[in-house]
Amino acid sequence: MASSKSTTTPDTSGQHELLVVGGGIAGLTAATFTARAGIETIVINDGESVLRRNAHLENVPGFPAGVNPRRFADMLRAQATRNGAEFQTGTVVNLTGDADEGFTATVAGGVAGDDKEATTGADDEDADPTRELTADRVLAASFPDAEFLDGFDIDTRTADGKQYAEAGELGRTGVDGLYVAGRLAERYHQAVIAAGDGAEAAITLIHDSDIPFYNDWVAPEGYWTDRGREVPPGCEEIDPTEQRARQEAAMAAMQEYFAAPHDQQQRTFPSLVDDEHNRLDWEQ
Ligand SMILES: Cc1cc2nc3c(=O)[nH]c(=O)nc-3n(C[C@H](O)[C@H](O)[C@H](O)COP(=O)(O)OP(=O)(O)OC[C@H]3O[C@@H](n4cnc5c(N)ncnc54)[C@H](O)[C@@H]3O)c2cc1C
């Protein structure tokens, strides 16, 4: 994917700790874990998760009667935001650098600082000029685009117009500081697999950093301390009052999410024309 714009402006917000490329199921789940671990995380996303094309999602754990896939994707995004991840829209068209000096992503289209679902493509005249984002580490979850990884010693392959990047163990690649996750890493094509794979790559990244061994558990008051143990890093003990407060906040949030049907129709396969079925018309 090449940019039609030639102006390059450096990102003024400085070097990020982690750039997640792709705000779909794997990327959003990864970002939730890394942000919760205190890693300053920015997600860059250029379109929509393929899951938004699903008509009704029936095999994700925790939803006995299924769930609207766009609702599910919105909730994943809200969860990443609530835990501290930030968002920009745009397409990563090139990536250079290494773990020692940091990575530089060239971003085309989109809007820096925009926290909405991407609406501007690389050629949109409202989009910001091509810009650069720098980060200590990068986690790529950008199905179906691996082109920006071309400069690295990572095996990629193309099949049916989609690109895949080979992940090593637990989401690591052969390049320090660079991780891949989700369908991009050719994992099975299910949301729960993508989410789990994003979580696994994120926890690997956390373990590879300076953060002490990290579990991300919330346990009841006294779970460790009553046994004379320290609360492990990344874990927390909460008392019954806090437990009730969190449960009430969760109930209120869920009631809000499920108070009304989602307002977006699923889209059909993008290469299908907008014919008499109007299947590309989200407003019908
Ligand atoms: C019609 C359909 C129905 C499905 N139904 C189900 C189902 O019922 N159950 C189920 O479990 N799974 C289902 N799936 C599969 C599921 O949607 C995928 O396996 C899952 O979304 C993969 O997650 P991912 O994060 O790897 O990719 P995605 O969720 O697609 O996320 C990738 C993100 O990366 C962004 N991106 C790509 N390139 C770049 C770039 N260069 N720069 C910035 N951003 C980029 C994309 O815009 C996208 O938002 C369905 C898929 C389709 C198409």
Image (tube, rainbow, N blue to C red):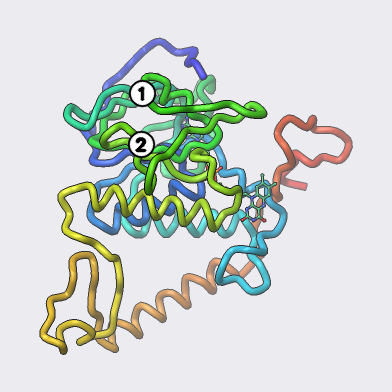
Question: Identity of the amino acid at label 1?
Answer: Phe
Please determine whether, in this image, residue 131 is positioned above or below residue 279.
above
Ligand 1 image position (quadrant) = top right
Identify the residue at image location x=49%, y=27%. 156
Q: Is residue 209 left or right of residue 267?
A: left
Q: Position of residue 30 (x, y in %)?
A: 39, 51
Q: Position of residue 234 (x, y in %)?
A: 23, 65
Q: Position of residue 68 (x, y in %)?
A: 65, 60
Asked if disc 1 is less than 8 Å from ligand 1, the answer is: no
Q: Is residue 194 left or right of residue 214?
A: right
Identify the residue at image location x=47%, y=70%. 253
> Image quadrant of residue 249?
bottom left
Element under disc 2: loop
Please determine whether, in this image, residue 223 is positioned above or below residue 35.
below
Question: Would you name the residue on which mark 2 appears?
Answer: 173
Please determine whether, in this image, residue 118 is positioned above or below residue 121.
below
- Number of marks in picture: 2
Question: Would you name the residue on which mark 1 appears?
Answer: 152
Q: Is residue 44 left or right of residue 228?
A: right
Identify the residue at image location x=36%, y=59%. 82
